[in-house]
Amino acid sequence: MSTEKELKEKLNVLLREEKIDFQQFLELTNELVKFDDENLRFQTDSGTLSHLGKGSIKDNTTAILELVKNSYDADAESVEIEIFIDDDERNNFIRISDNGTGMSEQDVVSNWLRIGFSEKRDQKTSKKQRRKTGEKGIGRLSADRLGSYICLKSKTEKSEVFGLEIDWESFDKQGVDLQLIPFKKVQSSDINLPVTKEKKATSGTEIIIKKLRNNWQQSDLERLYEEISVLISPFKGVEKFSIVINSNLETEFKGEIKQKEHIQPEVSISVMYDGCSDKIVYTLSDKFGISDEGDNFVNWDNIIQKENIQILNDVKKIQPSENKPKCGPVIFDLMFYPVDSNFVKDQKFTLKQLREYLSHNGGIKIYRDNISVKPYGFSTKDGEDWLNLGERQGRNPAGIARQDWMVKNNQVLGAVYISRDDNSELLDSASREGLIHNDAYYDLRALVLSGIRLLELHRHSIYKQINEDKPKRKSTKKILDEYKDELKKLRSELKTLKAEATKNKHTYVLNASSQVSSVIKHTEETEKTIQEVIGENRILGGLATIGIASAVFGHETETAISQFKMANSEAIESLNETPPDVDEALNELKFSKKYAKQVSQWGKFALSRIKRDKRTKRKTNVSKLLNGIINEIQPAYLSSDINITPNLEEVSAKTFPMDIETIVVNLLTNAYSACIKDTETREIKIELKTATIDDVKGFEIVIADSGHGIDDKLRDIVWEPLFTTKTDQQGNASGTGLGLTIVDSIIDELNGIRTVDRDSVLGGARFCIWLPLS
């Protein structure tokens, strides 16, 4: 009887035969199992290959790209792709050939035929220092997606040509063990490898695929050409790696694939994150020569404030988030192209050529170790706009004159560079179509979106510098005040004119003055309507503020309701005991009353904000008003360990109480959101004091917090509509972006002044609001 070692040697010899003896193979494997028959083992059905091959590859283009990546990993300098389509489908074939390192017979048997095995896990870098792209050991099965027959030939510098044929249809049988399907060796020294610099390659691999599963057409070749042309970043190429497509089909999309000539953008940004610190370093450049092109930086937690909501005991709780991205080190370049005639004016390209360039390279692609990761940036449903730029811009379609403007998806292209080794948390999905959507992926997404935001801010600053002489848009209140002054002058002049006309009996002047008086009357009615609209806006601003605050403090109310229900349930259980535990029930009901009071307090706080008397301009004790707000809102802050420290002078002013409340509640809500993300000191201070500016008596409200503060680059845009740094777990904007806009509009209407900087004591944001006393 043979030993286990002898049986394995016999099996290896058998597998090297041109035609494997099926019966002998079965006998050997059955004998081997007897040596370990006490252990249970996985068995692999032959249909598994179909699931891993044609079942997991999305389309023909993806399948060819997988095989080209294998050529790249093998240090090929040249790859030939030949696609032959004939009227007789039996003649159709696809040939992929490269001049890489190739494989010996032992390599094919021990590695290539071992599904799931990849030497790339241990040998991560090639001899040419290329970081190998595939580590799952199933990319070779891509050929099954293209056709049901494959002929593989390969050779190394030191070995002869070795080949085998595979009929993928043999693996479609159910209930047959994978190991029992034999292959056929190819006894041939003929191998067609690419020619480099007029020299025949001495090593490489050739794959010929027949019995094609799809009938290739010109549109398929076009897509293949386009995707291979951006397989490697057009902005950061790889030396000595060329790809040629040949086909008998009539098409312009063949020959050596070359990247389109680069068109300089109007504005670009290069961003680098080292993976360790909380700083994002970036460099800006533009065609106007305004950028200093030196290194700038912004803190991650200044531009991205991720909500980290965890559910504890069925209650949502906001937990502090990490102050740096989890994606690891990243470098990316973003380029902005306005698709209009002004940009192409005096350029060497036309608007049509610009659109073609953007269509070809458009989108923001991810390149891992210099090879593109599909589908990001490609023209597919999930890939073309993986950053949701279209939806983002659709929510706020402001023009470039506004600081909160946003780029359109077809105006920006870019490349994001990551690596397998440095970005270990950015993992491939099982289908090799994209990355697993984990925290690292969403942080990468948020990081790229922050780069886009910085680019947008810079482009707007350029607009302001170019158009600094243009008059600024006046507020509705200022326009109305100027209008009322002019109307007052006109009424006075009309009165004088009418008296003069009556005295001199100028009938035509009297008729004209009567008509003007009628116009003035209608104008005054219009003024009243505008005043009513302003009043309605005041109410809407107050309601919006309640909504914003409710969204922020909602989890506290939810917690109180959950605790209220729990305490009631405990009380009922205590009363249902035999005998009833009345003392325990009363104790639980006390807790229930406490939590009910918390919910009631928040409801009272919300309803009291819009009382009619607060919408009327009157003499108001501002310090008393602020104390009332603090007392009503403080329980929600204390439950999150946030301390509010007031320092209020006695101040009275003739103003709208609702306006003051709306300003303060919005600023306190922002301070709460900033503090909740800090694990250490959580403190807010609010100050009130009189202050005179330009001989105008007024008062200042200062609200500062111990959060991360607001970066100086964002201190203007935070007031713009819909701008927010708050994001959900996926990196999408989650804040309304309306709170500070409401504050800004009220300050503008009341002829006030607002500033924001960093508090020297608490270290976070410091908002200072000055308003006149009357």
Image (cartoon, rainbow, N blue to C red):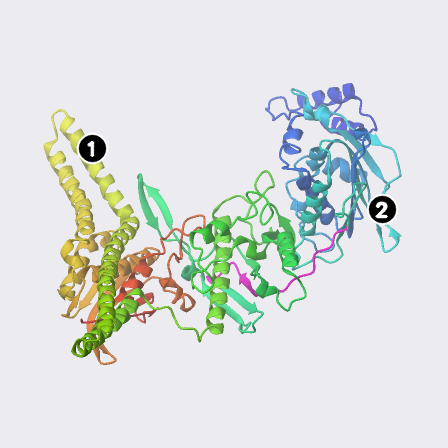
* Amino acid found under the numbered disc labelled 1: Ser
Q: In the depicted view, which residue is nearer to us: 578 or 594?
A: 594
Q: Is residue 102 visible?
A: yes
Looking at the image, residue 175 sits to the left or right of residue 512; the answer is right
Q: CA distance from mark 2 to mark 1?
A: 80 Å
Residue positioned most to the bottom: 695
Q: Residue 402: x and y, percent?
A: 43, 63
* Amino acid found under the numbered disc labelled 2: Lys
**Relative vertical location of residue 143 with respect to residue 127 in this rendering, above or below:** above
Kindly identify which numbered label has been placed on residue 409.
Answer: none
Look at 32% across and 46% down and name the residue there. Answer: 317
Q: Main secondary structure of the magenta part?
A: loop
Q: Residue 511: x and y, percent?
A: 23, 69
Task: Categorize mark 2 by other alpha carbons within 10 Å: few (<14), some (14-19), many (20+).
Answer: few
Secondary structure state at the residue bearing disc 1: helix
Task: Categorize mark 1 by other alpha carbons within 10 Å: few (<14), some (14-19), many (20+).
Answer: some
Looking at the image, residue 548 sits to the left or right of residue 728; the answer is left
Q: Which residues are magenta?
A: 256-279
User: Is 270 included in the stretch rendered in magenta?
Assistant: yes
The C terminus lies in quadrant: bottom left
**Relative vertical location of residue 467 with respect to residue 140 in this rendering, above or below:** below
Kindly identify which numbered label has been placed on residue 569.
Answer: 1
Give the image quarter of residue 469. Answer: bottom left
Q: In the depicted view, which residue is nearer to us: 75 or 626?
A: 626
Residue where numbered disc 2 is placed = 158
Q: Residue 696: x and y, percent?
A: 22, 78
Look at 70% across and 25% down and name the residue there. Answer: 171
Q: Is residue 208 visible?
A: no
